[in-house]
Amino acid sequence: QVLLVESGGGSVQAGGSLRLSCAASGITNTPYSSYSMAWFRQAPGKEREGVAGVDSVHRTNYADSVKDRFTISKDNAKNTLYLEMNSLKPEDTAMYYCAAASRRWWSDGIPKLMGSEYVHWGQGTQVIVSS
């Protein structure tokens, strides 16, 4: 059973930065390097949205709302996914979740940001951005 544990959330003022981490364990048959991964977020009263995704060959995809501010990366040696968040805005306030897809990539080469594409989920880490 793949276990994903997020960390790094917290409270920050607008314009600040945070780095989220997602450590994976319980990986047996399929190496971590073969997984595509993503970050999602959900704010109170809103639907979950995909933030950023990365496939097994490190191609990335970002939601328009975070492009040029957030960077997703995957360290296969550490079985860890990261989300570097800069120039944070109050609208970035949400619970952030990491997720893993049991596939190396998608046929069009674009990591998907739809929750239905991912099978393993973490419990989330809270990010609060104050103005």
Image (cartoon, grey):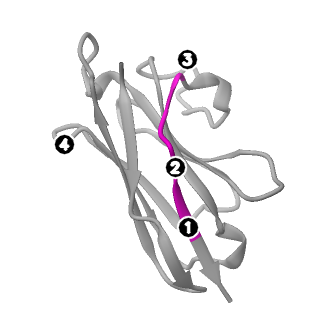
Label 4: which secondary element: loop
Q: Nearer the viewer, residue 82 or 60?
A: 82
Label 3: which secondary element: loop
Depth-wise, is mark 4 or mark 3 nearer the camera? 4
Q: Callout 2 environment at 10 Å: few (<14), some (14 to 19), or many (20+)?
A: many
Label 4 belongs to which residue? Answer: 78
Depth-wise, is mark 1 or mark 4 nearer the camera? 1
Q: Residue type at mark 2: give it.
A: Gly
Q: Position of residue 86 (x, y in %)?
A: 49, 74
Tell me which corner region of the image, top left, top right, bottom left or bottom right, holds residue 95.
bottom right
Tell me which corner region of the image, top left, top right, bottom left or bottom right, holds residue 113.
top right
Residue drawn at x 39%, y 37% is 4
Q: Residue type at mark 1: give it.
A: Val
Q: Residue type at mark 4: give it.
A: Lys
Label 2 belongs to which residue? Answer: 124
Q: Earlier in the sequence, mark 2 or mark 4?
A: 4
Q: Among all residues in the image, which is located at the extreme top?
A: 29
Marks 1 and 4 sit apart, C-alpha to C-alpha, by 23 Å
Q: Can you say which quadrant of the picture contains the N terminus?
A: top left
Question: Which region of the structure is painted magenta?
Answer: 119-127
Q: Callout 1 environment at 10 Å: few (<14), some (14 to 19), or many (20+)?
A: many
Label 1 belongs to which residue? Answer: 127
Marks 3 and 1 sit apart, C-alpha to C-alpha, by 33 Å
- Residue 18 drawn above or below residue 118: below
Q: Earlier in the sequence, mark 1 or mark 4?
A: 4
